[in-house]
Image (cartoon, grey):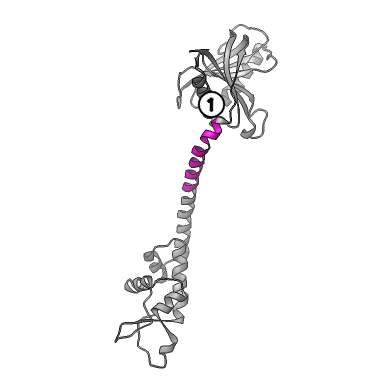
Amino acid sequence: MEQNYHCTEKEVPYYYRIGMFAQMNKITIKALRHYDEIGLLKPAYVDEHNGYRYYSSSQLPILHRILALRQIGFRLDEIQQILSGANETGMLLMKKSKLLQSVSDLTQKIAAIEGYLAKEDTVSAYHPIIKSLPKVKCASMRVQLDSYQDLFTYMPKMGEAMEKAGCICAEPDYCFTCYHDGGYKANKVDAEIFQAVTAMQDDMQDLHFVELSEVEQAVCVLHKGSYETLPYAYQALIAYMEEHGYMAAGEPREVYIDGVWNKDTSAQWLTELQFPIKQE
């Protein structure tokens, strides 16, 4: 960093007044004065009679370095440390880490905003229908889930138990889950898995058999995609029920048509929600 010194008359033309130096570098005079005050970039020469500041061409690389560091987010005190010999590489890596974290935080916020913006469109994309649900013989297993993801663990276990019991799955396949808690729970979820079978069997340990009665009316929607977005499907069902004067007449069923067992990605999963209803 160059310090103040006096020059001869011959040298004066090679210096730039602060206004010209500011214009050349697209920076304000106020900023250059501030850099002078804090010792970040002092003029090469100050006229002792009128106080005019002059800068030399040799100071251009220093100013450009300052401006470049400012553009990538460094504070003036940090730039002063770098110009004074601090580890520039280390400070750049630290700044990069902070910027990447900022990008991650902003990405999450943008995703949340997009979710809110798409909410109404997502709900309106569902097309509820009303249909009856036939009487059906089912094998069932009531389980307590630490999280909803535990269904992927219990379903294969239920399949093994059904195989030992000699069960034959009905055609077309009808596998669904009901939740008995009466509301959302983050853990210790009381769930029951049902699988339609061709014939009733004797109960065997955790595997039970039940014949479900016909449901005269159920409002149903198909949901394509991950189970994480199933709340939109439920919202569409409830909105439809409220609009048409229906009330719940039983527990909703989550019917698994396509899933992890036969599709490569969650975007291909297909689930039908079936909500038994009656007129208010």
On the image, the x and y values in percent for residue 116 come to 49, 38
Report if residue 113 lies within the magenta region. Answer: yes
On the image, the x and y values in percent for residue 85 come to 41, 70
Q: Nearer the viewer, residue 63 or 261?
A: 63
Amino acid type, callout 1: Ala
Q: 47 left or right of 151?
A: left
Please provide the residue range marked out in magenta: 105-123
Q: How many marks?
A: 1
Mark 1 closeness class: few <14, some 14–19, many ≥20 residues within 10 Å: many
Q: Which residue is mark 1?
A: 236
Q: Residue at x 50, y 24 (%)?
A: 239
Assign the magenta stretch its main secondary structure: helix
Q: In which quadrant will I find the N terminus?
A: bottom left
Examine the rendered structure and indicate whether residue 264 appears above or below residue 141: below
Q: Residue at x 52, y 12 (%)?
A: 278
Q: 126 left or right of 78?
A: right
Examine the rendered structure and indicate whether residue 179 appears above or below residue 114: above
